[in-house]
Structures are given as C-alpha cells and as structure tokens.
Image: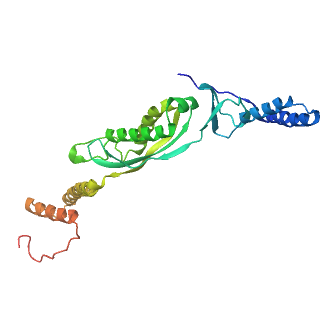
Amino acid sequence: MKAEKIIVPANGYLMLTVNLLLFFGSIAAMIMLESPFFVIATISALVIAPGFIMVQPNGSRVLLLFGEYVGSVKQNGFYWVNPFYTKKKISLRASNFDSERLKVNDKLGNPIMISTILVWRVKNTYKAAFDVDNYNDFVHVQTDAAVRKLASMYPYDNFADEGLDEDITLRSSVNEVSEALEKEIDERLTIAGIEVLEARIGYLAYANEIANAMLKRQQATAIVAARHKIVEGAVSMVEMALDELSKKQIVHLDDERKAAMVSNLMVILCGDKEASPVLNTGTLSH
C-alpha cells in the first residue's frame, strides 16, 4: 500500500504568463509572417491550459497520471501541473455528521433510541481516495456500526432491583461514553485516512414501547430512595429526642410511653401530610 506523497507543483502565475505569451505571440506571428508553423505553438498553448489548478485553504488535489498515483497538493495557491493529470478534489475541512436515531438494545437488552454527533476531517488523502470506495459513505456506515456496538456495551441506567452496579452508564457517564465512542469510531475510520475530532451522543432515550414503563420505574426508584432517606432521618431524630429527654431529665418515660412516643414521632416525620394535633385531656391510657 502506497503512502501519501505531498508535492508542490510549478507556480501557476508564471506558467499562465508563459502560456498567454505563447498563445497570443503565435497568433500575431502567423498574421505578420503568414507562416503556418506557428499553429503548432498555438495548439501547444491550448494543450497547456488544462494544467492550471487552484487549491483553496483546507483543500487538496490528488493527482493521477493514467491511473498511477503521482502525489497530493495540500498547500493552497495557484499552480500548474501536467495537463494529462487526473485531478481529484478532496476537502480537508472539518465536517459535521449528525447520525439518524437508531433503535438498539443496551447491555440489559432494553430497546433504546440513540444517535451521535461526529466531527471529522480527511487526514490522509491517499487512503481517502483509494483505500475506500466513497469515504463519505464509509464514515456514515461505520459511525452507525460503532454506535450500535457502544450501546450494547453499557446499560442505559443503573437499577438497584437488578443488582446492577455499573460505574459507566449511557445516561450519566457522558464523558466516559464519549471517549469510548470516539476511540471506537477512530479505529474504524483509520483505514480511510479519516481523523475523528469529536464524537458524542446527540440523542438518547428509551424506545417508545417501553418509555412509559421505564419512566414509572425511575419514579418508583426515586420515591423509594427518598423514603429511605426520610426513614433514616426520622430514626435519627427520634433517637436524638429520647437521648435529650433522658439527659435533661425533663420527663421520665417507661417502655410503654417510649414506644408510644416513637410511634407518634415516626408517623409525623414519615407521613406525606402534615400532622393534625389532638388534645388529650385525660391520661395516656384513656
């Protein structure tokens, strides 16, 4: 496999001057001297004309001579090359690709919708021109394949009821997932001489058929977690209240009254609604 060869062709302005002098000078000579031999010079000027090329900033031209790779011109400017060269234009500018939303399964088998945003550019013009059929299509297909593979490697989210304790998930580990995606795509596009500048998840959600169920599941998980925190706090507050009453000897509570106090405090602290006070004018037992 050949490597990329960078060349700098002849100055286009100098050759343009020579070509114009040759063309108009030969015509003037034919008129003045009435000699047909200057027709050859005129034809030569016309043959030279297709050799002029202009390379814009962040652009390139890949040159071929009857199917043989000659080199690539990457430096912007106005040049002249062999007029028999085949000139293939390849842009070196950064391109942005927003993939379609793909329906894939995550690590747990849940169907999700995912898309990626890719920023890339051509780094090796020889590979982009000759190692793949169409490098633009190659980028699109390989990016989709990389996204499918990435989605199967990580779960969408962690769920305690499944005993899953993943450090990296698609939803929460944005930086880690983006790095893994960028590495995967870069490995696939190296064959086409493509450099990956940035790759990240553009869209991520559960598929429509399970979206509602997963939303309820997430809400239930959040409610359970909140209740767990509330109970922990309530137990701590009840314990603190009993300790303070005991230390300051405000009131002496037997086991029955402690149990009643704990029950009342837990109901008040863990309840969804505000407690309604009840005035007891009798004893604790009545």
Q: Which residue is at the front of the view, 278 or 77?
A: 77
Position of 47 compared to 275: left or right?
right
- Quarter holding residue 88: top right
Q: Specify the quadrant that holds the C terminus.
A: bottom left
The residue positioned farthest toward the top in the image shown: 1
Q: Residue at x 49, y 46 (%)?
A: 97
- Quarter holding residue 254: bottom left
Where in the figure is residue 7, as x and y percent of width and height? 67, 27
Number of numbered discs overlaid on the protein picture: 0
Q: Which residue is at the front of the view, 216 or 9?
A: 9
Q: Residue at x 44, y 36 (%)?
A: 185
Where in the figure is residue 276, as x and y percent of width and height? 19, 74
On screen, residue 222 above or below 130: below
**In the rendered view, how is the structure colored?**
rainbow
Position of 248 compared to 176: left or right?
left
Where in the figure is residue 134, as x and y percent of width and height? 50, 37
The residue positioned farthest toward the left in the image shown: 286
Position of 66 compared to 268: left or right?
right
Where in the figure is residue 142, as x and y percent of width and height? 43, 37
Q: Which residue is at the front of the view, 111 or 261?
A: 111
- Quarter holding residue 26: top right
Q: Residue at x 16, y 75 (%)?
A: 278
Q: Which residue is at the front of the view, 263 or 109?
A: 109
